[in-house]
Image (spheres, rainbow, N blue to C red):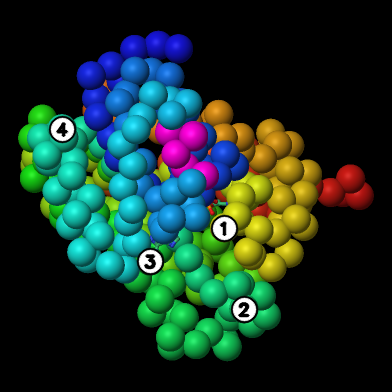
Amino acid sequence: MGDLLQGKRGLVMGVANDHSIAWGIAKAVAGQGAELAFSFQGEAFGKRVQPLAAQVGSDFLLDVDVTDDASLDAAFAAITDRWGKLDFVIHAIAFSSKNELTGRFVNTSRANFKHSLEISCYSLIEVARRAHPLMTDGGSLITLTYGGSNRVTPFYNVMGVAKAALESAVRYLANDLGPDRIRVNAISPGPMKTLAGAAIGGARKTFRHTEANAPLRANATLEAIGGTAVWLLSDWGACTTGEIVLVDGGYHVLGMPQSENL
Ligand code: NAD
């Protein structure tokens, strides 16, 4: 526990259960004094999120499907009514059809390409535009990405393209919102055992591969990702924006896998 985020209020989007990266971040930032609202996608997720939110002292729950403008408008209207301002948003949202997170990228369908990019990238822009006027004392937005954005990872396919677009959107948003002291960054963890992570073909193999090969010989933890978010949201992160912060045990520095035979 600490007070690095005392007095700050933030919206956490993307908690599905207690394995979610958004939940790891929520616990860490609440532990530093932040007051939280949670958005969830539909009633079934709402039932799971409600007790988690209660664990960190929040009863502020908002049903948001990021493909539905009306639900986004309603959520930000509720934040305006209750808080009048906002200090940060955690955007931990992505989706692609499981059928296309296996097999060959060349078979990506137009429909799933559009849907994946809309949910996994465009939604950050929709959220940033609505959060901006509420961030009257400056603010901070964090999204979540993955190294499959710029290096081919088996079966990540269209999500790699969506994450590349998302990372570019982070830089453009950082430049647009920077004059109002709003920072926009992405955290890029290695593979994590979550609902979304499990949808990717060969997820367990990827998890074991990075654990065996990363310089730290370990995958990221929810605690380490949460700690990185605390830094980025706090005054200690005041000069960092437009950045993709890797929290992957150092995996991205490798040129080739570890080998005992060399
Ligand atoms: P998760 O399944 O716990 O969270 C994904 C969330 O996206 C869910 O809460 C889901 O409800 C939400 N979502 C999907 N479509 C939505 C929509 N239309 N409207 C509103 N919400 C919607 O999985 P996670 O791994 O915690 O994913 C969070 C973020 O972290 C994602 O952006 C993901 O790509 C990223 N990430 C995950 C990994 C990993 O290996 N799991 C690694 C790096 C980055």
Task: State whether residue 59 is above or below residue 3.
Answer: below
Alpha carbon separation for disc pair 3 and 4? 26 Å
Alpha carbon separation for disc pair 4 and 2? 41 Å
In the image, residue 111 lies at what x, y percent? Answer: 43, 85
Q: Which residue is mark 4?
A: 83
Highlighted magenta segment, given as a residue range:
48-53
Is residue 164 visible in the rendered image? The answer is: no
In the image, residue 211 lies at what x, y percent? Answer: 73, 43
Q: Which residue is mark 1?
A: 196
Is residue 95 visible in the rendered image? The answer is: yes
Q: Which residue is mark 3?
A: 119
- Where disc 4 sits, the SS reads loop
Alpha carbon separation for disc pair 4 and 1? 31 Å
User: Closer to the N terminus: mark 4 or mark 1?
Assistant: 4
Which quadrant holds residue 169?
bottom left
Q: Amino acid at mark 1?
A: Ala
Q: Is mark 1 within 8 Å of ligand 1?
A: yes
Residue 38 falls left or right of residue 261: left
Going 41% across and 58% down the picture, which residue do you hit? Answer: 42
